[in-house]
Image (cartoon, helix red, strand yellow):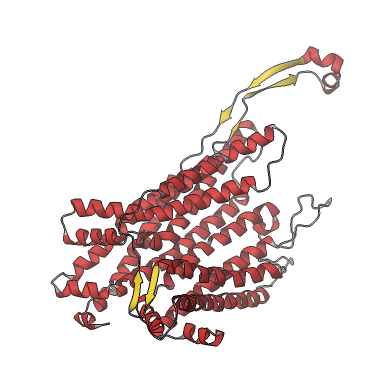
Amino acid sequence: MRPGALLRLALAGTRTDLARVILTALSAALAALAGLAALTVLAIPTPPATDDNGSRWSEQYANQLLVEPGLRGGTAFALLLLVIPVLGLAGQCARLGAPARDRRLAALRLAGATPGQVTLVAMAETGLASLLGTLTGLAVYLAGHRLLHQPDARGRLPLPTDVYPSTVGMAALVLGLPLVAALATALMLRRVATTPFGVVRKVRTRGPWPWPGLLIILGLAAFAAFRPVALWYDRRLVQPPLWLLPALLVGGGLAAMIGVVTGTGWISHTTGRLLHRYARRPAALLGARRLMADPWAGSRTFAALLAALIFGAGAAGFRAYFLATVELDGRTGAGMPSPDDFYLGTMDLVDLAVAVAMTIAAGGLLVALVEGIIARRRAYAALVAAGVPRGTLGRSILWQSLAPAVPAIAIALAVGLLLIRGAFGSPSSGGFSQEICDAGEHLCTDEATRAQYARTEWVPKITVVPDVPVEQLAWLAAGALVAVLVTVGVGVLFLRSSTAVEELRTT
């Protein structure tokens, strides 16, 4: 297939296809902006140490998160956190108008296209939309870089508009996101067979197995091994391999996150079976049958929200650990005497990023719910024609959304908190003996007289167990449930137009 023909086929379609391209491009632009902002923070150079600036602070910035080199990593991490729900939103937007696109792809097969060519068309459609979005995001970033470069009266900058990321990093981000989107499209089409007579999806006939729980256990074990591995190398006065400790954190975090997201399929199937067995009302029974018929819909729908909740619970757990460290330092008289806002600045930024991520994930939930209602409009119209009230259908959608969401939210919060507790544990001090000299400096430094005045004293071990951040976890759970309820309420508004009897005659 020639590139020109591939381009024309990728851009063809109806208004729904145009809306899908626009939403996908918008999601890619937001992801590119978040990634470019994180790269900019990491690109801030650290000045050399001088007599006036022994801490190597970047004094040209007004924000302390940019001034201190030690806080930039957390700032960049908070910005990168926003990429995850945005990519989830892009994945949900890519499913808009799926039935019409299936018919268009089947028409291409009928015209003589091979299955590989049809997959290539779908990949080109998603990749081009994402490339348009990343290029737009790059243009907005460059324009904002100039417009926001406004030093204050003291010559300090509110944002790092005096530095740019490396050209290689910017190119990798702008071109890498569309490539990842295209490859993800090919991965999602692996169970789809496009024939001249329609699109056939190979679905699993058996229920999901609880194997994602093994991934969660593996992730928790990797985080729990972080401290013992670091101490093992420290006691032997040997530096661990540069890749080992980051691999434990990154690999364990990814394993736990994948386990929570994919485990939603098993949760959906299990809750569907329990509802189908014990429920007595029609709405609950309809929701149960839908959960059993497509249990993996929960994994697709709640992926971004659950990822944001894991990060949010982890941030809450780290804040509790930090406050416990401050309390320990106050007891022992070392370190920070009080939890100054200066040290909590990055944590506040992470909390803000989690809130924004949950808001973006709610948008993805809404898109997925509306797309599901529209895609099943003939089935809903048939139920209405058979005498099922629309209110019953609305309540069945509520059951279908809340039944897997509640346990999945609880598991995501628990896993996020346990990851941090496993990696950092409880701060402690003491538990060792030390020699104390009760004489003056002259007598204590002299080896001949030091033994007369020296004594050994046992320093008791003090351990401060971090509090469980119940309030923050409750706010995260409430925010997630409100997001689900709001999206269900908005999605049900499309139910009336999608259950008209005329929908039974649509093709």
> Across the whole image, how many numbered discs are drawn on residues?
0
Q: Position of residue 45 (x, y in %)?
A: 75, 60
Asked whether residue 233 appears in the rendered view, the answer is yes
Vertical side of 63 occupied by 376: above or below = below
Q: Position of residue 471 (x, y in %)?
A: 43, 47
- Identify which residue, 109 or 22, lies in the foreground: 109
Q: Is residue 461 above or below residue 497?
A: above
Image side of residue 13 versus residue 174, left or right: left
Question: In this rendering, would 441 be left or right of 366?
Answer: right
- Where on the picture, by quarter, is residue 345? bottom right
Compared with 471, 200 (above or below) is: below
Task: Give the camera-side residue of 107 and 137.
Answer: 107
What residue appears at the point 38 percent right and 72 percent down from the top-left corner? Answer: 193
Q: Quadrant of the C terminus?
A: bottom left
Rendered residue at 66%/62% (across/down): 41
Q: Position of residue 372 (x, y in %)?
A: 32, 70
Q: Is residue 299 above or below residue 33?
A: above
Decide which of 315, 379 is in the foreground and name it. Answer: 379
Percent coordinates x, y for residue 4 in the rendering: 55, 87
Q: Residue at x 83, y 23 (%)?
A: 441
Which residue is more in the foreground, 365 or 146?
365
